[in-house]
Image (tube, rainbow, N blue to C red):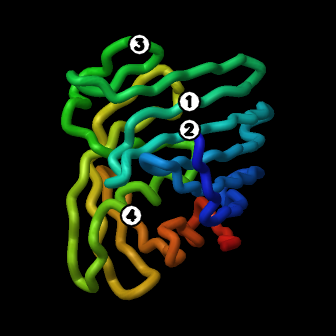
Amino acid sequence: MTGRTAIATAHWRRLDIEGTDRCTLSRLDHGWMLVGQAIWHEDGTDANLTYDVRCGPDWTSLSADVSGEVAGRALALRLRRGAEGWLLNDEPQADTSNCPDLDLSFTPATNLLPLRRLTPTDGHSASVCAAWLLPDFATIARLDQTYTWIEAGKVSYTSPNFTADLDVHETGFLTRYPDLWEGWVDG
């Protein structure tokens, strides 16, 4: 990884609990990278996680590292896309073979990946399948998602049991995720 050029940095604050997240999008010689840190306090416990997500030039997710501490427990995860699907610390994860996108449950940063990979057109919908790191940090599961472009800067997001209209910066970072996140983008 010789060439790395920062494109933009997103900053968010959580709306449902006390917490923040900051993520930088960089262009690499052969793809893209998200590097961020999420910190939150929930139900008397603290969490502090860093994450690195690597994508190919077409925005297809390739791998990620998540490390830090959640509720006093050290966490070190390696998520990697293999020939048969996603692996979590080298353990195959069921039903993830056709998931080009990675969704880290604790950050809005990874919504950028399908938004950059897909072509936005008002009224256009795209169904995608993400490899979703569950909030227990022990499993990656398939998560079917639909993005519908409402107008420039606004997308409707739907997954099982969840729907929201999201505000999207021109970089692809979300700036508003109702009741969960709000933020801004530098760059």
Question: Which residue reaches farthest front?
Answer: 2
Local crowd size for mark 4, using a 10 Å CA cut-off: few (<14), some (14–19), many (≥20):
some
Residue bearing mark 4: 116
Local crowd size for mark 2, using a 10 Å CA cut-off: few (<14), some (14–19), many (≥20):
few
The residue lying at 70 percent from left, 44 percent from top is: 37
Tag 2 or tag 3, which sits nearer the N-term? Answer: 2
Quadrant of the frame with the C terminus: bottom right
Local crowd size for mark 3, using a 10 Å CA cut-off: few (<14), some (14–19), many (≥20):
few
Q: Nearer the viewer, mark 1 or mark 2?
A: 2
Q: Is residue 66 above or below residue 167?
A: above
Residue bearing mark 3: 90
Looking at numbered disc 2 in the image, what kind of residue is underneath it? Met
The residue lying at 48 percent from left, 51 percent from top is: 32
Distance in Å between CA atoms under marks 4 and 3: 28 Å
Residue 88 picture location, percent across and down: 43, 20
Q: Nearer the viewer, mark 3 or mark 2?
A: 2
Element at label 2? loop
Distance in Å between CA atoms under marks 2 and 4: 21 Å
Q: Nearer the viewer, mark 2 or mark 4?
A: 2
Question: In the image, 74: left or right of 158?
Answer: right
Looking at numbered disc 4 in the image, what kind of residue is underneath it? Arg
Are discs 3 and 2 less than 8 Å apart at CB? no
The residue lying at 30 percent from left, 66 percent from top is: 147
Tag 1 or tag 3, which sits nearer the N-term? Answer: 1
Tag 3 or tag 4, which sits nearer the N-term? Answer: 3
Tag 2 or tag 1, which sits nearer the N-term? Answer: 2
Element at label 1? strand
Looking at numbered disc 1 in the image, what kind of residue is underneath it? Asp
Q: Which mark is residue 65?
A: 1
Q: Which mark is residue 1?
A: 2
Question: In the image, 69: left or right of 135?
Answer: right
Element at label 3? loop
